Amino acid sequence: LASAAEAEADTAMSSALAQLALAHVDLLLIPNAGPGSAGRAAGQNGTSSSQQGRNAAAWAAAEGLHHKGKARAIGVANFGAQELRDLHHGAGSGSGSDSDSRPSSVRTPAVNAVEYHPYSDHANHHEALRAYCTQHSVALQAFSPLAAGDPAVGLVHDPVLADVGRQRGVNLTSAQVALRWLWDSHDTTCTVRSTSAGHMALNLQIYQASTLPQNSMERIDKLAAAKGASSRLHKITV
């Protein structure tokens, strides 16, 4: 759900639920209505008034779906701390008969999904975002926690991650180390896309491993700076 009037969103959601043969979805995410790819490449990360308006309109539409029982929870994607503040202060100020008659606003997103992995700019961006989400009880969720396995990025074959896995004595793969790094110290859940049953089983094995040693965590923390803080998708606004 990007940006739509509440009536349009309701119609689209009803159609989607019919195709899925479901009465509701567990979680509906609102993508950030930020600058396009050209603006992101140019580093235009500010929150404009038009962007705030689009985010607020999409959120109001999502709230309507939530109150009608078509989405059990609603969240956002690619929102920085400032954009979450803007949404929080603007929530509940919708217009129209639908917003006037429904219950009070769901002011806090259940989830904020952002690209987050050892090469992402967690030092400059994610630490402030993580602090905000923790303070306001927003679950921070990492998508592309393995940088989508992109060979051009190279995270799943990173020699530092591989070395950490070998030193632990249980032969964790680079991918498993990256996922365990998120789990151990970053208050972050993650969604890993895979069509391989073998990869799915390997991903779940990280919960059976012990906590990464502090010196290993510090080595992984330094990878973003060494790699130039690679983020393939979206620069968030702190």
Image (cartoon, helix red, strand yellow):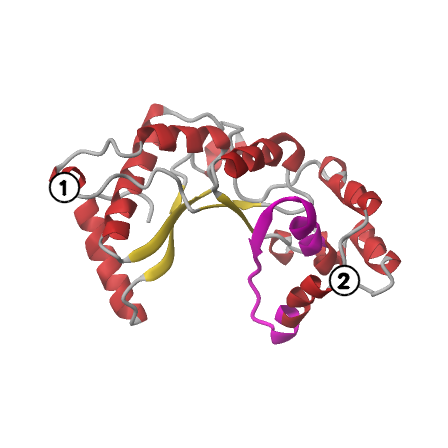
Which amino acid is tagged 2?
Answer: Thr
Q: Secondary structure at mark 2?
A: loop
Inspect the magenta stretch and tell me whether residue 153 lies in it: no
Quadrant position of residue 186: top right
Near-viewer residue (148 or 17): 17
Q: Position of residue 92 (x, y in %)?
A: 26, 34
Q: Is 62 situated above or below 194? A: above
Q: Position of residue 146 (x, y in %)?
A: 64, 54
Q: CA distance from mark 1 to mark 2?
A: 53 Å
Quadrant position of residue 20: bottom left
Residue extent of the magenta highlight: 178-200
Near-viewer residue (26 or 173): 26
Which residue sits furthest bottom? Answer: 197
Q: Position of residue 117 (x, y in %)?
A: 64, 47
**In the rendered view, does 116 fall on the left or right side of 90?**
right
Q: Position of residue 37 (x, y in %)?
A: 47, 38
**Residue that numbered label 1 is attached to:** 101
**Residue that numbered label 2 is attached to:** 173
Q: Secondary structure at mark 1?
A: helix
Q: Nearer the viewer, mark 1 or mark 2?
A: 1
Task: Give neighbour class at mark 2: few <14, some 14-19, many 20+ (Cα, 10 Å).
Answer: many
